[in-house]
Image (tube, rainbow, N blue to C red):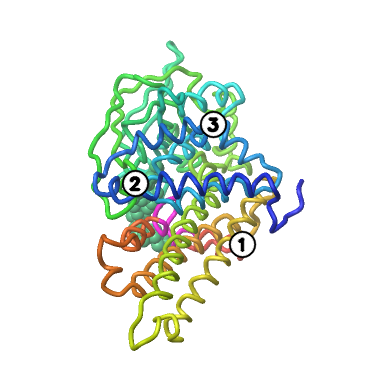
Amino acid sequence: MTTFSLDPGPDQTAVRDWLHGFAADVIRPAAAEWDEREETPWPIIQEAAKLGIYSLDFYAQQFFDPSGVGIPIAMEELFWGDAGIGLAITGTTLAAVAVLANGTDEQIGTWAPQMFGTPEDVKVAAFCSSEPDAGSDVSALRTRAVYDQAKDEWVLNGTKTWATNGGIAHVHVVVATVDPELGSRGQASFVVPPGTKGLSQGQKFKKHGIRASHTAEVVLDGVRVPGHCLLGGKEKLDARLARAREGTKGGGKNAAMATFEASRPAVGAQAIGIARAAYEVALDYAGTRVQFGRPIIENQGVAFQLADMRTRIDAARLLVWRASWMAVNNKPFTSAEGSMSKLYAGETARFVTAQAMQILGGNGFTREYPVERMHRDSAIYTVFEGTSEIQRLVIARAISGAPIR
Ligand SMILES: Cc1cc2nc3c(=O)[nH]c(=O)nc-3n(C[C@H](O)[C@H](O)[C@H](O)COP(=O)(O)OP(=O)(O)OC[C@H]3O[C@@H](n4cnc5c(N)ncnc54)[C@H](O)[C@@H]3O)c2cc1C
């Protein structure tokens, strides 16, 4: 276990500066274009791959960095550049985390590298949990996984929605129900290998923000995957289902929830990147925009807004770093610290980007300045990976032990 420190050390400082350079020189200048195009920015992902920023090795190194805050530092810098492109570059990690959280060592070794491809032939991956009738209520998933013992294959049928990289991914990770009577305790995650028949992209969504990130439905029509594609293996699943049927403790860990728990501090860090970017634009603008014969920052009304913005950003970062350090050091989130970090960082991004637009006045409302885009991008951070209401529910249950609904 490493001691928590607010100084991540020379290695992480160097990584932060390196990523900041990429975000400033490559991501930020391309942000408006890809936002308008609403397409995956493949050339930028490829450039990130060539530099080693888009690779399993890089994320593994950041995750296992002894500071415990390698991932939040990386996320904050990339999303400071732009959230849509940032998500196009890092969306694969959600699927990778699903394999890391639920898979065997062999499965991790097989699938995680394939999700990223190579710098010459980059690939992306998708994590498909949400469905039209199962968003916040993960226990309501209808996608079925049925085991065909004769062929040692799983057959998947259902429709997934809102999948980041859905349909364009090389590898899809799909959460499905094996025993619907058990609700979320009867679910498991499956890898759908590249080129598997029966998986297709449904509607691609036109979105309010993070528009450079591809979001689509994924249709699973009689998709057959080999037995070894069940993450964690059948023996473990059977034992877990048996415990759940008996109502024994320990059968409750759910595949989708395990993935979301592990990824919440990282998502919070993305929101902080957006908030910091908007705050910097607003601070700069307030120092140079003159009204009534003085820079607008000399009005307390404006300066206090900036003070609040900065205070919330720093507070959010502290929550995210604490949760990330706890996760890396296997400290359980007894008070839902992961949810706290995501909740506060997401709400901070909403607050700060709205304030930034206000400080820019009319300019803030146009696409000549980036804060309008940042404000649109921030909106997803109180929705995906558990809405703010669901984070509050998780925190309230954790701190009270009460069955709050
Ligand atoms: C751009 C984008 C990318 C996404 N990427 C992925 C992805 O890669 N993989 C994936 O699986 N999913 C993904 N999602 C899905 C996302 O996680 C869900 O949208 C989210 O969990 C909310 O589900 P929902 O949209 O069905 O809203 P609902 O669950 O229908 O919620 C609607 C409203 O009701 C509130 N609400 C619901 N239940 C309660 C309650 N018990 N108490 C209080 N309030 C409640 C919610 O907070 C919300 O305000 C993505 C979504 C978007 C928009």
As drawn, the residue found furthest toward the front would be 293
Residue 125 placed where, x, y %?
A: 42, 32
Q: Earlier in the sequence, mark 3 or mark 2?
A: 2
Q: Amino acid at mark 2?
A: Ala
Q: Are marks 3 and 2 in contact (CB under 8 Å)?
A: no
Between 119 and 17, the residue placed more toward the observer is 17
Amino acid under disc 1: Leu
Mark 2–mark 1 contact, CB under 8 Å? no
Please say whether residue 340 is visible from this viewpoint: yes
Does dot 1 land on a helix, a strand or a loop? helix
Work out whether mark 2 precedes mark 1 in sequence or the reverse, and give the earlier one.
Answer: 2
Label 1 crowding class (10 Å Cα cut-off): few <14, some 14-19, many 20+? some
Above/below status of 261 relative to 283: above
Does the residue tagged 3 have its C-beta within 8 Å of any atom of ligand 1?
no
Q: Between residues 30 and 110, which one lies in front from this camera angle? A: 30
Which of disc 1 and disc 3 is earlier in sequence? 3
For label 2, the residue is: 30
User: Badge 2: how crowded within 10 Å, few (<14), some, or many (20+)?
Assistant: some
The residue singled out by tag 1 in the image is 318
Q: Which residue is mark 3?
A: 56
Residue 342 on image: x %, y %: 51, 57
**Label 3 is placed on what type of residue?**
Leu
Q: Is residue 132 left or right of residue 25?
A: left
Residue drawn at the location 69% of the way across and 58% of the way down: 6
Magenta-highlighted residues:
381-391
In this rendering, the answer to whether 168 lies above or below 315 is above
Q: Residue furthest bottom?
A: 292
Residue occupying image coordinates x 31% and y 31%? 167
Circle 2 sits in a helix, a strand or a loop, which is it?
helix
At x 70%, y 56%, the residue is 7
